[in-house]
Amino acid sequence: MLGIIIERVTGRSYREAVEHYIINKINLHKTDVITSETINDLIVKGHNKGNVLSEQENYVVPFAAG
């Protein structure tokens, strides 16, 4: 719900609002919001005892919950 409220109050997408009001304000140059457009560039697969895990959690689904 909070993500939807943020979008309606700010008139920006959730990603744009987080970037504008948080990331850019405190100069987090290596921080981004995970969306369906950015997920492939931002998420790496985990490792377990030297083996790359093939499954990855879909971090886009929780929206503003994470």
Image: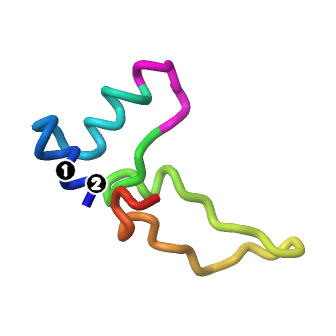
Q: How is the image coloured?
A: rainbow
Marks 2 and 1 close (CB-CB < 8 Å)? yes
Residue 28 inside the magenta-drawn segment: yes
Q: Residue furthest right?
A: 49
The local secondary structure at tag 2 comes to helix
The local secondary structure at tag 1 comes to helix
Horizontal and vertical percent position of residue 8: 11, 45
The residue carrying pointer 2 sits among few (fewer than 14), some (14 to 19) or many (20 or more) residues within 10 Å by Cα, namely few
Magenta stretch: give its range.
Answer: 24-31
Q: Which residue is mark 1?
A: 5
Horizontal and vertical percent position of residue 40: 45, 58
Give 34 or 2, whichever is nearer the viewer. Answer: 2
The amino acid at mark 1 is Ile
At x 40%, y 22%, the residue is 24
Quarter of the picture containing the N terminus is bottom left
Q: Quadrant of residue 37?
A: bottom left
Question: 55 above or below 66?
Answer: below
At x 51%, y 36%, the residue is 31
Horizontal and vertical percent position of residue 13: 19, 44
Q: Which residue is mark 2?
A: 2
The amino acid at mark 2 is Leu
At x 19%, y 55%, the residue is 4
Residue 30 inside the magenta-drawn segment: yes
At x 30%, y 43%, the residue is 15
